[in-house]
Image (cartoon, coloured by chain):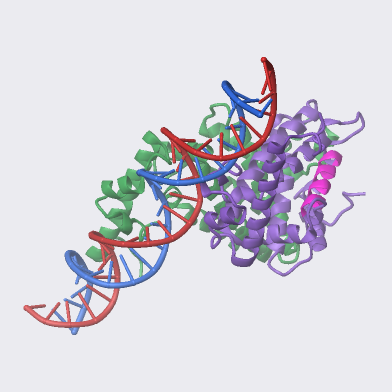
Chain colours: A green, B purple, C blue, D red
DNA sequence: TCACCTTTATGCACCCATTGAATTTTTGCA
DNA sequence: TGCAAAAATTCAATGGGTGCATAAAGGTGA
């Protein structure tokens, strides 16, 4: 049952190799020439397949960049799935956020350069930004559903949606706003966490003190 | 200085008439056949211009749907621009939110049908959703800058971004999540307000009581 | 009213992503 | 080896979008 890469046939191995080749060729080209300037024909040629065949690997040019987004989301949902009796809504949400931010800024499976490139591309290329935002919206919806299922007695579906939308929306905007200056991945990570803390404390807290930097995270 | 439609030349009037014709023809067709199924050629033909000329009126097919989004955003920024000494961050933000929600769900300048159609299109058509999200992100950034300028002593630029991202992100997700059932425009308006209140109170409040429906709004 | 300049509009030739259909090549397996 | 299924290829077409050169108005001063 496990696809441990040794017991699968030639067919599957070849497919994975082509997939890898496509991703690497595309990312290299996006890096050098930009996303728009890179044509599908070039990407396909670099991986030795016809342009038509490209579409049996990815549904669109944009999808190459987000090829591993699904597992990230599954990780987030998995965290919510095993709620313990003494878990709190904010506690679990912050755990999800922390894991997600680490994922985006450290990137275990690829190099750190990949993470940096991806961030740059999404900030720069309109088509990728649009795709990323749509994906983010979809994932937020699923996350909200998972949150409500984890805490059915504390949050309504709408409140779960508000909570997920708020915390992810805050992080997203804070990161984008802070990205104007050249920043390290660590700085981005901390900006995201700070934004999350503001949301946990509530906007009202912004009016009650000079700064809302609290102790939301252990 | 005022463009009162009587003192402008024939050139300008003709341009506005063509623009109107494009918008109306396009929206009607989007409504009847869907966004994707409507081609630029049809839209242009309905307004009696060549398809090439279409692009001197709108930069893309999607832009027709959001033709009046800019003034909405200017209204939001205008609210923040005249902060009074006793205004609070959350108070002003809620005022902006309330105005924006009313704008989207009541639509003074067009019919209510226009508002309903636009919501349906954005929920349904991937291309429009992507465009809407990108526009929303840009507007949030500008709103965050305006918020920081209105309260430079209370919120840092990052906190302003977190606040705007949180409240708009919460509303967005709550509205999208709640849109699965057929809902009236009033119901959408109230869902949005409820989401905003959750954010104002803070996510932590979700853990402190059974429900977080508070009295954030007078 | 005419000549002249500036804005708009158009036609045309492209590029590129994406899709459908028909066909051919590969691979897995009996 | 031979055959069925999966994958890759070829070919054609659609549709959004752009650059460019040219034509048609519209505005303006003399």
Q: Is residue B193 visible?
A: yes
Q: Is residue A152 magenta?
A: no
Magenta segment main secondary structure: helix
Q: Where are the magenta residues, as a range?
A: B91-104
State which quadrant residue B69 falls in.
Answer: top right
Q: Nearer the viewer, residue A24 or A127?
A: A127
Residue at 55% x, 47% y is A130
State which quadrant residue B74 falls in.
Answer: top right
Q: Is residue A216 visible?
A: no
Residue at 75% x, 50% y is B203
Q: The N terminus of chain B appears in which quarter of the rendering?
A: top right
Is C15 on the left-hand or right-hand side of B129? left
Is A63 on the left-hand or right-hand side of A80? left
Task: Provide residue A142's location: percent of width, then percent of height.
Answer: 60, 61
Residue at 68% x, 40% y is B139
Task: Provide residue B11's location: percent of width, then percent of height.
Answer: 68, 37
Task: Provide residue B49's location: percent of width, then percent of height.
Answer: 57, 49
Task: Provide residue B16's location: percent of width, then percent of height.
Answer: 70, 43
Q: How many marks?
A: 0
State which quadrant residue B213 falls in.
Answer: bottom right
Residue at 77% x, 27% y is B149
Residue A99 against residue D1 in the figure, above or below:
above
Is B195 on the left-hand or right-hand side of A100? right
Residue A181 against residue A149 in the figure, above or below:
above
Q: Is residue B93 magenta?
A: yes
């Amino acid at each position: 049952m496990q696809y441990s890469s040794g017991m699968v046939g030639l067919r599957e191995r070849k497919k994975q190799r082509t997939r890898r080749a496509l991703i690497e060729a595309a990312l290299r080209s996006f890096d050098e020439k930009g996303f728009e300037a890179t044509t599908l024909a070039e990407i396909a040629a670099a991986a030795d397949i016809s342009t038509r065949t490209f579409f049996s690997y990815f549904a669109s040019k944009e999808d190459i960049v987000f090829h591993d987004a699904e597992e990230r989301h599954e990780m987030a949902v998995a965290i919510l799935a095993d709620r313990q009796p003494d878990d709190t809504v904010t506690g679990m949400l912050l755990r999800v956020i922390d894991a997600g931010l680490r994922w985006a800024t450290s990137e275990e499976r690829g190099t750190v350069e990949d993470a940096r490139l991806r961030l740059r591309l999404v900030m720069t290329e309109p088509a990728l930004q649009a795709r990323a935002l749509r994906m983010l919206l979809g994932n937020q919806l699923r996350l909200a559903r998972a949150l409500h299922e984890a805490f059915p007695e504390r949050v309504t579906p709408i409140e779960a949606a508000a909570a997920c939308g708020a915390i992810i929306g805050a992080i997203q905007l804070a990161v984008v706003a802070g990205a104007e200056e050249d920043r390290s991945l660590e700085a981005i990570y901390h900006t995201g966490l700070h934004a999350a803390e503001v949301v946990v404390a509530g906007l009202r807290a912004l009016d009650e003190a000079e700064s809302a930097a609290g102790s939301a995270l252990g």
